[in-house]
Amino acid sequence: MTATTPLLELRQVVKEHPTGPDRPPLRILHGIDLMIAPGELVAIVGPSGSGKSTLLALLGTLDRPTRGELFFDGHDLAALGEPELAALRGHRIGFVFQQFYLLPGLTTVDNVATGLLYTGAGRSHRRALAAQALREVGLGHRLGHRPAQLSGGEQQRVAIARALTGAPALLLADEPTGALDSASGTTVIELLRQLHHTGTTVIVITHDRELAASFPRRIGIQDGRIAFDERDDAPGKGGAS
């Protein structure tokens, strides 16, 4: 696809964490330059401690760079306050994590409906949208179940449904298969691919090089730097062009 404005753009982004008085900060990311076009399906791969989760936090506006520039759909995020960033996350970014973060006392449909609280929609409308999202991930028969009554793969699908309810432009998935068996992990990745085919930009953070190799774009992170950025542009692979 052709895009004049990247959905995400990082220019010389540095992220540091303080280490204490009179000690130099710990640098996690070292001058990252990166562009993600709308509608891409991307794997960001690297070992533990490489900086990939820190990068995800910046891409999802959960954290700010120490230095450098970060743009979302052409907008400089440094110009936005915390309320504006929260609204951006609520309306345009969905998150899926290795830990499912489901509330044990709520049913499946109500766990998904919590993703729509920011919209101001009434409870019945939120639950109707949640039920539709659950049907889309193959859990229409589990609406009244609680998390403890679901398998790990089903809980991850609930988390994906929750991320889908706001029709986000960007979905960020941090090790979404890390806590799952291989069959459940395959199902989850297929759901993310289906979401990508609807036009959502999907970025998956993983340490699994075999999984990353199946994506049309692979970005390698090593010691806080981009080690490689590879792309398959063959028809049907889903990459941006």
Image (tube, helix red, strand yellow):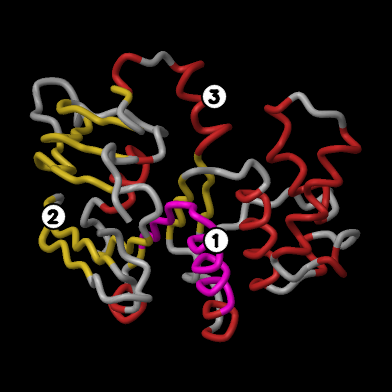
What residue is at 69 percent from the left and 52 percent from the top?
102
The Cα–Cα distance between marks 1 and 2, rounded to whole angstroms, is: 26 Å
The Cα–Cα distance between marks 1 and 3, rounded to whole angstroms, is: 22 Å
Q: Which residue is mark 1?
A: 195
Q: Determine whether 5 is above or below 189 in the image.
A: above
CB under 8 Å between callouts 2 and 3?
no
Q: In front: mark 1 or mark 2?
A: 1
Please tell me in which quadrant of the rendered image residue 117 appears: top right
Q: Amino acid at mark 1?
A: Leu
Dot 1: element:
helix
Q: Determine whether 127 is above or below 146 in the image.
A: above
Q: In front: mark 1 or mark 3?
A: 1
Q: Amino acid at mark 2?
A: Ile
Q: Is residue 40 left or right of residue 45?
A: right
* Residue 13 image point, x, y percent: 16, 35
Placement of the N terminus among the 4 image quadrants: bottom left
First along the sequence among labels 1 and 2: 1
Q: In front: mark 2 or mark 3?
A: 3
Q: Which residues are magenta?
A: 187-205
Q: Is residue 127 left or right of residue 165?
A: right
Q: Determine whether 148 is above or below 117 in the image.
A: below
* Residue 157 image point, x, y percent: 66, 65
Q: Is residue 207 left or right of residue 164?
A: left
Q: Amino acid at mark 3?
A: Ala
First along the sequence among labels 2 and 3: 3
Q: Which residue is mark 3?
A: 87
What residue is at 46 percent from the left and 46 percent from the top?
170
Placement of the C terminus among the 4 image quadrants: bottom left
Could you say which disc has been placed on residue 226 in the image?
2
Between 34 and 27, the one nearer to me in the picture: 34
